[in-house]
Image (spheres, rainbow, N blue to C red):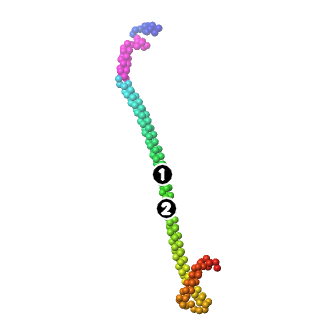
Amino acid sequence: MLIYLAAEAGETEHNPIIPLWQELVLGSIAFALICFVLMKFVFPRMEQTFRARVDAIEGGIKRAEEAQAEANQLLEQYRAQLAEARTEAARIRDEARADAEGIRQDVLAKAREESDRIIAAGNDQLNAQRESILRQLRTEVGTLAVDLASRIVGESLADEARSRGTVDRFISELDTTGPSAGRRR
């Protein structure tokens, strides 16, 4: 029916549904030209851009994996160094404790030696003072004994030799009875 209508309208008018052959040729040439330009310039450029992006993404992933592997390696090195540092710190701490104990023992030994020396010096000094006091006491006791004996006997024991003999006898009797006998009385 379209054909019929087209025939009735006349040959002079153009049917908009059916294109003209010149338009078909011109459209085909333009289409071929656009396809040629796209295939020659645009598609290779797009392919190149696509490859560059793929390479960049794959390279980025590869670099990220390498960075991750390097980070893991550095982390393991850090952990090993940390463990080594802890071991070293424990060793140093143990050595310091041992040194401190040695120093403490040395100080205690020196203090004991000094204490023993001071005690020995004190004992020596005490013995010397005791001997000095005993000599003084013997002399005084001897003099008192001679005076007392002179009074008891009623005669003067002024003679030096006699008084010395009497004092010596008295002192020797005191020595034989000892200090414990004198304390019991």
Residue 3 visible to an observer of this rendering: yes
Q: Is residue 147 magenta?
A: no
Q: Position of residue 168 (x, y in %)?
A: 55, 84
**Of 78 and 57, which appears nearest the observer?**
78
- Residue 49 x %, y %: 38, 29
- Is 64 left or right of 130, judged from the image as shown? left
**Range drawn in magenta:** 13-39
Q: Is residue 128 above or below residue 72?
A: below
Mark 2: few/some/many CA within 10 Å (<14, 14-19, 20+): few
| Residue type marked 1 | Arg
- Residue at horizontal 45%, vertical 46%? 81
User: Label 1 vs label 2: CA separation?
Assistant: 22 Å
Residue at position x 44%, y 38% from top? 69
Identify the main secondary structure in magenta.
helix
What residue type is disc 2 on? Asp
Q: Secondary structure at mark 1?
A: helix
Left of 182 or right of it: where is 14? left
Q: Between disc 1 and disc 2, whose residue precedes?
A: 1
Task: Quickly name the residue at label 1.
Answer: 91
Q: Is residue 66 above or below residue 133?
A: above
Closer to us: 117 or 38 = 117
Give the quarter of the image for residue 142.
bottom right
Q: Residues within 10 Å of mark 1 (few under 14, many from 20)?
A: few
Res 10 quadrant in image: top left
Residue 62 drawn at (x, y percent): 42, 34
Of helix, strand and loop, which one carries label 2?
A: helix
Residue at x 53% of width, y 88% of height:
161
In the displayed structure image, the side of residue 153 where residue 31 appears, left or right: left
- Residue 12 locus on image (x, y percent): 39, 10
Disc 2 designates what residue? 106
